[in-house]
Amino acid sequence: MLAVALLVRDLLVPTTTETRAAAIGTMIVIFLLSVAPTIEHFADPDGHRIYQLLGGEIFEGALSRGTLPGCVGPDDRWLLGRCGDVPVLSLLNAVLDIINVLAGLGVGALTVGMILCLETRAGAAIEDQAALLATNLQRMRHQLYLSGLVLTFGMFFVTSWMYWPMPLISDAEVSDYSSVVLAAALFTGIYFTLLILSFYLPVALILDGRVRRLADLARTNDQSGEPVDIDNWRTVHGLNEGVSDYIRAGLALAAPILASFAGGLSPISF
C-alpha cells in the first residue's frame, strides 16, 4: 500500500496528460495480470491452488484438524465467505487471494513508479536538467529500496504458509518436506528478484546514459575557457554513481535473503 501511495503522489504532481494516462493504463494491465489467478479461483473455487504443488493432501489433512469460530457446517459463512468442508483451508485460500490482490497492486505501483523516474523536461537548462536527473535517481533508489522491502516481507509470508502444516507432519517426513519448502522459497525469491531487476536495471541504464550525455554537454558548453572536471561536476550535482553502482545496489537488496534460504537447502548445507 505504501508503493501505491507513492505512485498516487507522483501522479498528482504536474505532468502531461499522456504520461498520467500511460502510467494508469500500465498499472491496470499489470494489476489484471497479477490477479488473474484470483479471478480464476472465484470462477472455479475447486480449481488448482498453489499449495497443491507442495502436496494438496498434506494441507487438507493437516488443516482439517482445525476449525473457525462459527463454522459448524460447510454451508455456514464467516467473514471472508463460505466455511467449506475444511474451514481452515478456506481461510488459507481467502488469505492467499487477498495477498495476491495486494501484491498485484504493489508490483504494479513499483513498476510504474520506476518508469516515472524517466521524467524529462524539454528545453530545460543544463543545471535544471542536472537537478531533475539527481531527483529521478533518488526516486529510483527509493523505489528499489521499497521493492526490496516488499520482496523481504513477501518471502516471509510465502514461507510462513508453507510451514503451516509442519507440526502435523510425521518426524520421518519432516526433513523431506522442509527441503521441498526451502527449494520452493528459493525459486520464488529468485523469480521475484529477477522481476524487480527487470524494471529497475533498464531505468538505471537509461538514466546513466542521460547523465553521461548531460556531462558531455556541460563540458562542450562551458564558457570559462578552462577544462571542466567532469568527475567533480557529476559529484557536485549528485550524479557521480555509475552502472556498476546501480547493479550492486540491485543485487545487494536481494542477496542476503536469497543466501539465507539457499543456505538452508540440505544438499548445499554444511
Image (cartoon, rainbow, N blue to C red):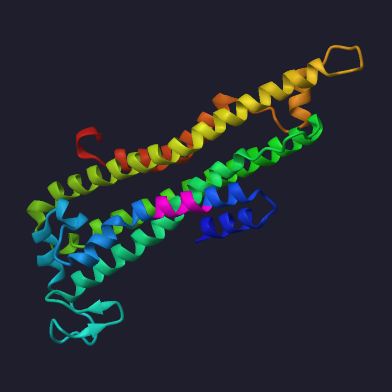
Q: Nearer the viewer, residue 148 or 100?
A: 100
Which residue is at 42% across, 37% downward? 255
User: Height in image: 32 above or below 214?
Assistant: below
Judged left or right of residue 165, residue 7 is right
User: Height in image: 61 above or below 157?
Assistant: below
Which residue is at 46% across, 34% downward? 251
Quarter holding residue 71: bottom left
User: Height in image: 220 above or below 235?
Assistant: above
Judged left or right of residue 92, residue 98 is right
Residue 143, image x, y percentages:
55, 46
Residue 114, image x, y percentages:
54, 43
Overall secondary structure of the magenta stretch?
A: helix
Q: Is residue 25 magenta?
A: yes
Residue 161, image x, y percentages:
26, 60
The part of the chain drawn in magenta is 24-31
Q: Is residue 169 visible?
A: no
Which residue is at 77% across, 33% downward? 123
Residue 180, image x, y percentages:
18, 46
Q: Is residue 57 magenta?
A: no
Which quarter of the image is occupied by the C terminus?
Answer: top left
Q: Is residue 218 visible?
A: yes
